[in-house]
């Protein structure tokens, strides 16, 4: 549904913090399914942890937030410009169930629960195969800066 070239046009993130590789499905205003391919070449693996590389939980949440941003932009039928920033405003109930390691494919599933007064609330889950890796309620908003 959306390849890396289209994602780069929508998200302001770039290497090493761009954490969505492909969008597989999207129902505007409802849900998105995307993937993050986890490679040993990720810069965070040098220090987290050298003897047993594990993707940091905060980056799994960031990947879910980036998928949520793509859903938000499609829902509003907008693209952001240099003066618009998409922010986290809350993360509730984050639970980490499985480590994510090099070679894993992180499946990002995000459902829009509510959009009110400029705040988006999402139910977000990321899995590897059939195993849940992380789940959380995410709240995000867009703000003009400058």
Image (cartoon, helix red, strand yellow):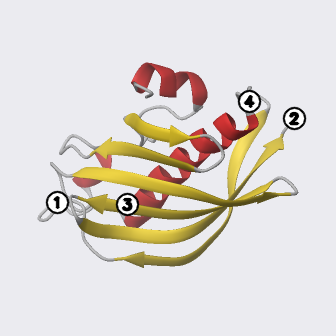
First in sequence: mark 2 vs mark 3: 3
> Do the CB atoms of the residues marked 1 and 2 lie less than 8 Å apart?
no
Q: CA distance from mark 4 to mark 1?
A: 41 Å
Q: Position of residue 12 (x, y in %)?
A: 59, 31
- How far from the left and from the top, in percent, is residue 49? 21, 63
Determine the secondary structure under disc 2: loop
Q: Callout 3: few (<14), some (14-19), or many (20+) C-alpha neighbours within 10 Å?
A: many
- Of tags 2 and 3, which is closer to the observer? 3
Q: Which mark is residue 31?
A: none
User: Mark 3 and mark 2 in contact (Cβ < 8 Å)?
Assistant: no
Task: Choose mark 4 or mark 1, whichever is in front.
Answer: 4
What residue would you read off at disc 3?
Answer: 126
Residue at 31% x, 61% y is: 127
Q: CA distance from mark 2 to mark 3?
A: 34 Å
Residue at the spot 27% in from the left edge and 61% down from the top edge: 48
Above/below status of 33 relative to 112 = above
Q: Residues within 10 Å of mark 1 (few under 14, many from 20)?
A: few
Q: Which mark is residue 146?
A: 2
Secondary structure found at label 3 = strand
Is residue 135 shown to the viewer in this render? Answer: yes
In this rendering, the answer to whether 106 lies above or below 96 is above
Q: Hey, which quadrant is residue 82 in on the image?
A: top right
Label 4: element kind: loop
Residue of label 1: 50
Q: Residue at x 66, y 44 (%)?
A: 72
Q: Which label's residue is closer to the chain start, 1 or 3?
A: 1
Query: How far, Cα to Cα, is label 1 from label 3?
Result: 24 Å
Given contact means CB atoms under 8 Å apart, are the residues at marks 4 and 1 in contact? no
């Amino acid at each position: 549904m959306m390849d890396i070239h289209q994602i780069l046009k929508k998200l302001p993130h770039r290497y090493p913090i761009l954490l969505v590789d492909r969008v597989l499905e999207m129902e505007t205003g409802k849900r998105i399914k995307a993937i993050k391919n986890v490679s040993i070449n990720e810069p965070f693996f040098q220090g987290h942890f050298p003897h047993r590389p594990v993707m940091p939980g905060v980056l799994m949440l960031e990947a879910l937030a980036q998928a949520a941003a793509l859903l938000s932009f499609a829902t509003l039928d907008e693209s952001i410009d240099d003066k618009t920033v998409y922010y986290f405003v809350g993360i509730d109930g984050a639970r980490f169930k499985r480590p994510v390691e090099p070679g894993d494919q992180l499946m990002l599933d995000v459902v829009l629960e509510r959009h009110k007064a400029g705040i988006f609330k999402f139910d977000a889950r990321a899995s590897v195969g059939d195993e849940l890796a992380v789940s959380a309620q995410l709240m995000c908003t867009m703000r003009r800066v400058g």
